[in-house]
Amino acid sequence: MRKTGTFKKLLAAFLAACCCVSLAACGETPTGDAGSGSGGNDQPSGAGSARAVALASYPEMAPYPDENDYIKTNGEIKDSFNDAYKAWVASMRAQRDQPEGYADGLDGFFMSSIRKFLKDGDSGNTVYSPLNVYMALAMLAEVTDGESRAQVLGLLGADSIEAVREQAGSLWNANYRDDGLVTSVLASSLWMNEKINYNQSTLDTLAADYHASSFSGEMGSAEYDRMLQEWINEQTGGLLEQQASGLEMDPQTILALATTIYFKAPWADKFGEQNTKPGLFETPDGTIKTDFMHRKSPNDYFWGDSFSAVGTGLESGGAMWFLLPDEGVSPDELLEDGETMEFLLLKDKYSWENRKHLMVNMAVPKFDVSSDIDLIPGLAALGVRNVFDYTVSDFTPLTTNEDEIYVSKAEHAARVMIDEEGCTAAAYTVIMTKAGAAMPPNETVDFIVDRPFVFVITSADGLPLFVGTMNSPVSAG
């Protein structure tokens, strides 16, 4: 490789939980509490002198029809509501209609990265979005070549860039939802140095296959930093504003790559606010008081040698799962257990052998937790090394203007909140013979999540959107 000078490449991928990826250029993005991912303007607010180089667009979805918006005749809703409902169902099914086996081969990446990044988090509570980090790494593979690309593909479990490109497109589409009821949006953008010439075909591929927009501006300027921060805040509904406020690109930055995930869905069966009451939670550092949501309802109860688990359905067709370790087992130890990881990654959890339908007395703490993860040590430990070393890295698909390019920063931030209504989550990455236990003795079981636990938010297809370890809940109220 030609050695002309040392330049930094900042890769920013913002996640899920949460690493929603949406493109500002083609549509309205998540804002405030409501969030959205289509319609609007891809140019970040306060764009100034920066320019959009390549823009992407989002699919149009039929809106979820609210019965209250339709006039009833003789106590029945008019045909217009039925037509709107059918259109909404058809739109949702069309978006999820992906090739059979589109997510095959991801278990290895999910397992290794979940274990690595949840254990490497900076706080007792750690949140990680495997899907967000997958999309960031897939885009990283597109802008690299040679051994640099091979190492990324190896971690993702793919044998070619074409395979990753096809899978990433299916993952994006299967997890896109913006219909007024549920928001699930993945967004991506490239922030380029205006002094560097880039390969337009690579930018076009990222726009077409990853729904990524590209922008060009003055690296190191406060205005360009503010634009990046505002873009991230728009894509994540402002949930990660504190983390995003610290993002800066210095004059030597070649590229900032940002991916986000924003997810907001109501429970299929809401918790009654009247049933929320204070309770005690045993943290590693002692007992604290926090608010617990209570519900007694028929549900499926799952168990293994070291855990019990209950899922709460979401209107998205997905679910949030609570994995309670047995007494004396920590969340980190639980994630190292093979049986637990098998359950966590099982797409159809109702095929799990140790399952029984019971009346479940459930108590779960309300929480609002976030975490920040430096991905570089974990990625290096997982085999992705060359991109961090400018003497061996290969970014020729991105630009031949400069050779000594390397990843100087790879950060992941995520936040998950749950209350009586549902869950909201966001993430970003800047470039994540069975021995069954005894059956529950009765037809009613208490599932009281009052000690450190693991939680998982899964898509309608059972893929892990966000995974977290909770050692000390923070009240969402």
Image (cartoon, rainbow, N blue to C red):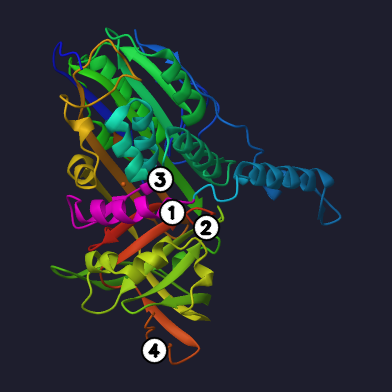
Residue 255 spot, x, y in % from top left: 28, 21
Are discs 4 and 3 less than 8 Å apart at CB? Answer: no
C-alpha separation, residue under disc 4 versus residue under disc 2: 29 Å
Front-most of residues 72 and 206: 206
**Which residue is drawn at the image coordinates 20% and 37% (left, top)?**
385
User: Above or below — where is 211 with respect to 444?
Assistant: above
Picture disc at residue 314: 2
Are discs 1 and 4 less than 8 Å apart at CB? Answer: no
Q: Quadrant of the C terminus?
A: bottom left
Front-most of residues 476 and 74: 476
Residue ID for mark 1: 423
Q: Is residue 277 magenta?
A: no
User: Above or below — where is 168 with respect to 113?
Assistant: above
Residue 303 spot, x, y in % from top left: 40, 78
Residue ID for mark 3: 131
Q: Say what amino acid the circle numbered 3 marks.
A: Leu
Provide the residue span drawn in magenta: 104-131
C-alpha separation, residue under disc 1 versus residue under disc 3: 17 Å
